[in-house]
Amino acid sequence: MKIKQFAKSLVLSATVAAGPALAADDEVVIGVSAALSGSAAGTYAAPAEGLKLYLHLLNEAGGVNGKTVSLVIYDDQGDASRAASNAKRFLTQDDVQMIISVSTSATFAPIISQATRGKVPVLFAGSVCPAETMPPAKPLLYCSTGFSAVHDSIAMVDYLRDRESSDATVGFSAMGIPISRAGMEEAERLVLKADMKSAGVEIAPPGTADYTSFATKLIQNGADSVLSWAPWAVQIRFVDALRKQGWKGNAYVGHLAEAELEMMKMKDPNLFTLGTNVMLFEDSEATQTLVNAVKESGSNLHPESILDGWVGGIVVEGVLEQLGEDTSAEAINAVMSNIEIDTKGLRGGPIKWTDDNHFRETIYYRAYRWSDEKSAMEIARDWKAYEVE
Amino acid sequence: MSNIETGIGKMTPATTRRKRLSQNQVAWIGLIVLLVLLPTSATPFHLDIASQIFIAGIGALALMVLTGIAGQISLGHSGLMAAGAFTTGILYKETGAGIWITLPASVVAGAVIGLIFGLPSLRLRGIYLAMSTLALHFLVIYLGGEYEFASGASTGIFLDPPVVFGFEIYDGYAWYYVLLALVAGTYWGCRNLLNSKTGRAWEALHANETAAEALGVQVANYKLLAFVITSGIASFSGALFAYYQNFVSVEAFTLFLSIQYIAMIIIGGMGSLPGALLGAVFVTLVPYFVEWLMEAVPYIGLDITTVSSASYAAFGLLMILFLVFEPSGLTGIWKRLVGQFASPSKREDTP
Amino acid sequence: MQILANIVVLTSLYALVASGYVLVYKVSRVLNLAHGELMILGAYLLVATSAGIASDPLVAIALTAMFSIVVGLSVYLLLMRKMTGQPVLAAVLTTVALGILLRGAMVLIWGPQQLNVGAMISFDNASIALTDSVRVSTAALWLVVCTFLVYLGLLAFLHMSRWGMRMRASGQNALLAAQRGINLHTVYALAWTLSTFSGSLAGVLVTLDSRIDVNMAVIGLKAFPAALVGGLDSLPGALIGAGVIAALEVLLIHYVNPLLSDVVPFLVLIAILIVRPWGLYGTKEELNRV
């Protein structure tokens, strides 16, 4: 049970930070606010471990240019008030030079608000990217994940147009949180613009237990295919509800951490995921490194579930490489606002940030599906680049 | 009564009362001095916790008056706080209004909602009433969510720190004193209210509505008054929450928050205003206490998700323990402790 | 037509859950706000039995039913028994606290991730065509059948058996019932056991139909207006209340705005309660309870 060791080291790092946080010149203190417990922990606890694991290995290898990273991790339970509390603690007590958020969109507002006040850069490394990181980006806010309601929608609709007939009717399923709704309404606009028909956007309130009626409505509105962009549990229960009513169309959902394992169990060849991460069934050097690192740490987490946090770690490493003598928050922000980071094959291309774009200049999407012939997962369409405007 | 007593035993009761009064005063002055001086030795983190306790204290006082004194159950407390926070947030975002407009507006909004959702209380009792307040919660959250979505504030509404007489309240110290003054003011206001005719009417209708009516208490009016006043205060605390945290979003006001407030008044001790404050302290501190426990025992051998859900479960267990073994809550424990200390001196006084 | 089928399935779910509220309230005037959590606990018990003891679906479900009876009995004996004679508000709040405790404990034991129970006991939740255009899942069909059987069984039990009679008598007047030699503790324990059993059954079936995580306990909250609309102490009332709330929810989702499906049932509830403060079929309570 290495997860215990992980927890211990979390606790230890928290203990270290609870004392006077003396940031040595060669040590960069980073505060991490993550949903380690609560209803969202199923999604965010694993990437938080990925981040921790990557930076732990980085420190063990001697850091970057003699600089090491000290993580101060606090649990926010995906709850806004706790995130606010954590952010205040980072700024006033732990004197962090950077904040990393691995938590729900509910915690964005407090984190952004506190960090902007305290002039400390924030990296969103496990969640959907807040609109504030996209052009025109607000200063100090950066995002390393590939999740963006609007851009995912663009890529999903584009892929859907490849597969479906040009007069297809498309249904949409969102969760009743602003970010998911905005994404699906954008997707509907794009579908209508492409002269396809819409069966409507179904918005399920958070905490919906039964998606049957939502699915019925889309089926009755004649949906040939369905797009969904929401937390994995919502997307997949919605697809379940459609299938239960005998619906056989293609379903396109966002590629989230749970996708690979779940799709291998569901064996549904008409279910496609669109996303910016690779699935780990492919053997590449980068995926091997990740899988081995998880194995060696003894953690019982699934490697694919930590990928976004791991990439967050790669970003931190890239920033440290460019960082000079000055390791202040201001200097870190200056580096982050103009950088290109190689994602080592875990994504379709590099993460590139400029002054007014803290998301991606070009974003690469890949589609995956279950293949009955191969009885394995397969790439349904390889990387395709989209410009971010 | 007191005249008769003083008439019979001239010396002793008078001295006892003076002594008691001064003891009480000393305790209060001591507490105030302690609270005023506390920031000198506190870290910003401690100040943040203290400020959270003060905001929770204001909300808990409101719920204590409504449920503990006037006997009306509410599951809509979190909804009312959301109403206050959103009134402030929307006014600030749309008009840039200052604190002198947003705070009173939030109180008024809360009071109006309180009036509307107090109306069913004229027909409904107990559990049925609690349900109608649950509707209030869902309604406010729905409307707030619609506003967030419609205004494109998908990550919530951001608020700048409030400016009072040219001073910006942002610093932890400033907030500490401002909130301390506000919670003290709310406490003082509630106490005076309880000692007034209104307070006695509430207690009467809590004890027995029919009897209260027979005694000439206008039950309907006083019930509604309880809803209006406490909803105004709850809404006020929600607005303070918004300013203190610099943001408003529906996701911050869950049903669990309402339950936490109910836990505060139970753990503090039903019917006691100091109990509401004690409960606020206790419930706010529980998660930090568990966290501290983890830090103190680093080799406890549990992963972090385990510890966090254990603290959630522990919260439920604590509530159960209080309900089963200490129904009068922390105030009950406190009174018993004081009683043990006070009883010997009492014996000395009585000849 | 599919909409009608959806309403019937949802009605069955709410009715089955609401029957648990009614049973406990009818005999002891306590509203069990931990019912949603007890329901999901039942489903997790299935996860536990299928993983540890029995891999055969039917054996696993039968064992789960037995365990749920044990759970119901222990909730009464270890906790709620201590609250008899206390103010009803205290008892209700105790159930709230129990709900929180159970939630924490379930995450502690089974983790926060969503689990696919159906796959665990190799239950094939196939889609069944009732007519050309109406389809329901296997689990949903079971849900409708089970709700029907549970209601039939409960009504027969309450009205025809000796213990059923005793339960009704205790609910109408506890003091008088006790004087007539009815052991109130046995009656209350019976009510809690039956209530937890029907709740667990609902939990098992609904999670077999989708997936399981702790947040599914919210169904308890949704079935709540159903029990109240009908009147908290009437089983037929709960059935009708479930129908009203389920129809409202499905129709709102289909024709109006799904986001209103959380709010409107409660508003309708208030409206009905203002006209009939004790629900459609509930017994009018003269006493100032709570």
Image: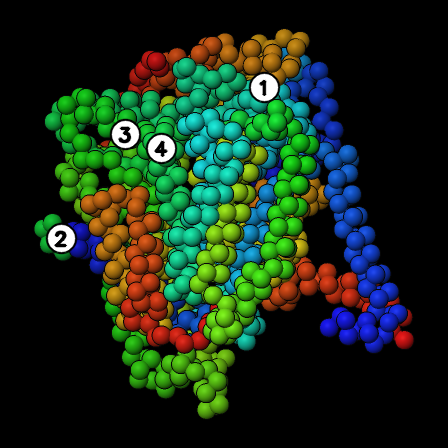
- Indicate the chain on which mark 2 is placed: C
Q: Are marks 3 and 4 in contact (CB under 8 Å)?
A: no
Q: Is residue B81 visible?
A: no
Q: What residue appears at the point 41 percent right and 79 percent down from the top-left corner?
A: C171
Residue type marked 3: Glu
- Cα gap from disc 3 to disc 4, whole angstroms: 11 Å
Separation of marks 1 and 3 at Cα, in angstroms: 34 Å
**Callout 4, which amino acid?**
Phe
Label 4 residue SS: helix
Q: CA distance from mark 4 to mark 1?
A: 28 Å
Q: Looking at this rendering, what residue extends furthest in the bottom direction?
A: C180
Residue at point 32%, 29% (across, down): A183
How many residues crowd around disc 2 within 10 Å: few (fewer than 14), some, or many (20 or more)?
Answer: few
Q: Nearer the viewer, mark 4 or mark 2?
A: 4
The residue that mark 3 highlights is A185
Which chain is disc 1 placed on?
A: A
Query: Which quarter shows the C terminus of chain A?
Result: top left
Rendered image: mark on residue A119: 1
Q: CA distance from mark 4 to mark 2?
A: 33 Å
Q: Residue at x 39, y 33 (%)?
A: B148
Amino acid at pointer 2: Met
The lab-note entry on whether marks 4 and 1 share a chain reads no
Q: Chain of mark 4?
A: B
Q: Identify the residue under disc 4.
A: B149
Indicate the quadrant where residue C90 lies: bottom right
- Packing grade of label 1 (10 A; few <14, some 14-19, many >=20) is some
